[in-house]
């Protein structure tokens, strides 16, 4: 408050000259009267100092000329009334002129010092005000989030603080005219803007703006531009980090599904959904290229409930003007407008959902263009930017998961084919043995028995030999039948799972408590798997478990067959050390099933297998 009051006092306009003359006369008169009163109690020598107060006041307020005039008037009054002989001018009549001359010199010096003091104080106050203006301008610029939005506010503040009619700050090229003067704003010699002021300002004001206002304004603007650039870079970095974090989180979710061993369809659904969320699409789809220039829909996703998308597995031919064909030809991301030319069931669905833009990115698996990922956006006016790059980045991340899912799916299919081929081979061998070797052995046995009955009584030794040979042939036939059952049980093909398991229970050397809750025939591959699980388990119990009872529960509900086998043996079974258990695990997994073995030492063994039944 004190500084503001002092500034107002210093910047007060000079009073009128006539008032200054009156004040000078009054001051000289009052000082003369005061000196005449003081001369009675003091010596005359220091009384001249009384006149210096008036000279100082007039010089400070009205300047040096009127101060000099006041000094001369004070000297004349001093000579006329205080220097003896009084009431007469003694400047040229005695040696008193020396004292008078000294007084005049001191008075003139005081007058000049007062005028100089005022100019120095005004200059200091002007510098302080300019510093305050620069500091306020810098605060406004450095606190602004958007530099261009803050420039009008800063310009109004400058005009108000500097007492100018108008001020404008313009970035970029700007020129003056007869109404405006453009003061250049430079950064290391390069002009980046202008301070625009009225052209009719006094040259002193323009020079003061150019020398004292422009340099700090340049520094503040350069700092603000640098801060804005840093803020933009930080915002871009935050956005990039958020994007990377989002993609990494999506990749973790997809990788979790892959690690859990879910089906490829679930993985493709997850990938399509994650891609839609990442690029903020309305719909997404994944298609696979086929050698016959067709594409197969692997998955689709929608941000909102709407029309039903095409079913997974839908096949369509490539349309030359379509997005999938464009990506196949170029191997690069592309975009098209969704219109009547968009072919196929997927294209019709996209039009029905009012999608206006379709963007596709290639899916490259092990160096081969495997398929295309498509993102649909509603509305023609919506033209998303940077989607192609984000799709490419995310596809590169998830392609390993896709490759692993495809490899696992192909491995499972291959293993299923191997198991099916093995079962078919077993079935064929069993059938060949039953229809070929077994029938011939039965025929030979009958012929031997017929020969035995035709032997005369007088040849008992021959009869005995033929009987012994027939019995041996019967044993060979029984062994062959056992071998045939081990290869593929004929009763399983003829009677189904229930009779086959009952036969295994009857033949088991360990008592078996069997419960079969299967009311109808299961697919052959499932029945064979269940049969061999029970057969191998009973063999292991007989060989290793030292059990007194085996509990077997087989049932089929909810689209899956479940086998639970428990014994009260010694436990401690290790699946990794038994080739039979490993073979059972491969067989179950080939059917997309699961098998679990729990065998704590001394507490028996429990085997649980779950096999999807599928279509019967």
Image (cartoon, grey):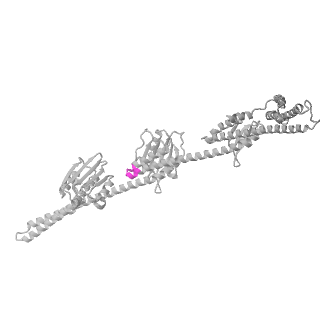
> Farthest front residue?
41
Q: At 13% from the left edge and 68% from the top edge, which residue is drawn?
A: 469
Let me know if residue 496 appears in the view: no
In this rendering, position of residue 227 left or right of residue 102: left
Quarter containing the N terminus = top right
* As drawn, 478 above or below 296: below
Front in this rendered view, residue 125 or 335: 125
Q: Residue at x 21, y 49 (%)?
A: 515
Percent x, y of residue 410: 38, 55
Residue 426: x %, y % from top left? 27, 59
Q: Is residue 174 above or below residue 489?
A: above
| Foreground pick, 142 / 569 | 142
Q: Quadrant of residue 118?
A: top right
Residue appearing at x 40%, y 53% in the figure: 405
Q: Is residue 125 magenta?
A: no
Give the extent of the magenta segment: 256-265
Can you name the residue that lies furthest to the right here? 93
Give the x, y percent position of residue 442.
16, 62
Judge whether residue 162 can be spotted in this image: yes
Looking at the picture, does residue 85 appear above or below residue 263? Answer: above
Q: Quadrant of residue 46?
A: top right
Tell me if 502 is positioned left or right of 180 in this view.
left
Q: Is residue 257 magenta?
A: yes
Q: Position of residue 318 (x, y in %)?
A: 47, 48
Outermost residue toward the left in this view: 458
Q: How many marks?
A: 0
Residue 459, compared with residue 327, is above or below; it is: below
Residue 54 or residue 83, whichever sits in front? 83
- Magenta span: predominant SS is helix
């Amino acid at each position: 408050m004190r500084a503001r009051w002092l500034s107002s006092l210093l910047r007060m306009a000079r009073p009128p000259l006539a008032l200054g003359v009156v004040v000078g006369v009054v001051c000289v008169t009052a000082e003369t009267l005061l000196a005449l009163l003081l001369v009675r109690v003091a010596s005359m020598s220091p009384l001249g100092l009384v006149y210096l107060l008036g000279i100082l006041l007039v010089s400070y307020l009205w300047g040096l000329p009127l101060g000099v005039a006041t000094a001369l008037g004070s000297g004349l009054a001093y000579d006329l009334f205080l220097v003896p002989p009084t009431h007469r001018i003694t400047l040229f009549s005695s040696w008193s002129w020396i004292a008078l001359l000294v007084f005049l010199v001191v008075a003139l010096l005081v007058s000049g010092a007062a005028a100089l003091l005022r100019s120095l104080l005004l200059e200091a106050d002007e510098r302080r005000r300019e510093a305050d203006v620069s500091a306020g301008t810098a605060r406004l610029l450095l606190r602004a989030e958007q530099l261009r939005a803050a420039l009008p506010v800063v310009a109004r503040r400058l005009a108000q603080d500097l007492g100018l009619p108008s001020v404008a700050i313009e970035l970029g090229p700007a020129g003056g005219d007869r109404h405006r003067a453009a003061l250049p704003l430079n950064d290391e010699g390069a002009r980046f803007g202008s301070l625009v002021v009225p052209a009719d300002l006094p040259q002193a004001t323009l020079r003061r703006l150019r020398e004292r206002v422009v340099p700090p304004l340049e520094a503040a603007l350069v700092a603000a531009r640098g801060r804005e650039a840093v803020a933009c870079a930080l915002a871009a970095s935050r956005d990039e980090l958020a994007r990377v974090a989002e993609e990494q989180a999506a990749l973790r979710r997809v990788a979790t599904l892959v690690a859990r061993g879910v089906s490829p369809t679930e993985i493709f659904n997850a990938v399509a959904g994650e891609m839609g969320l990442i690029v903020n699409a309305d719909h997404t789809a994944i298609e696979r290229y086929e050698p016959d220039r067709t594409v197969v829909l692997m998955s689709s996703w929608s941000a909102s409930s709407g029309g039903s998308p095409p079913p997974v597995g839908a096949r369509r031919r490539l349309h030359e003007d379509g997005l999938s064909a464009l990506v196949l030809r170029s191997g690069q991301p592309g975009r098209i407008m969704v219109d009547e030319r968009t072919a196929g069931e997927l294209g019709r669905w996209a039009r029905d959902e009012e999608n206006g833009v379709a963007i596709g990115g290639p899916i490259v698996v092990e160096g081969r263009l495997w398929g295309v990922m498509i993102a649909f956006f509603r509305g023609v006016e919506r033209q998303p930017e940077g989607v192609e790059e984000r799709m490419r980045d995310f596809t590169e991340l998830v392609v390993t998961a896709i490759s692993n899912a495809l490899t696992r799916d192909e491995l499972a299919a291959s293993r299923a084919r191997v198991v099916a081929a093995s079962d078919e081979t077993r079935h064929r061998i069993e059938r060949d043995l039953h229809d070929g070797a077994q029938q011939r052995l039965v025929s030979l046995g009958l012929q031997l028995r017929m020969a035995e009955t035709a032997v005369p009584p007088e040849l008992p030794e021959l009869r005995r030999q033929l009987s012994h040979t027939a019995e041996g042939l019967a044993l060979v036939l029984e062994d062959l039948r056992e071998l045939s059952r081990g290869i593929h049980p004929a009763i399983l093909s003829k009677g189904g799972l229930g009779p086959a398991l009952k036969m295994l229970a009857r033949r088991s050397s360990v008592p078996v408590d069997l419960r079969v809750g299967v009311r109808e025939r299961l697919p052959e591959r499932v029945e064979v798997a269940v049969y061999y699980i029970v057969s191998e388990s009973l063999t292991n119990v007989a060989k290793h478990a030292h059990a007194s009872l085996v509990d077997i529960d087989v049932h089929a509900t909810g689209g899956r067959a479940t086998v639970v086998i428990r014994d009260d043996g010694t436990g401690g079974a290790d699946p990794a050390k038994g080739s039979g258990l490993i073979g059972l695990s491969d067989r179950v997994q080939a059917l997309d099933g699961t098998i679990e073995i729990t065998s704590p030492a001394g507490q028996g063994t429990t085997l649980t297998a779950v096999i999807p039944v599928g279509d019967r």
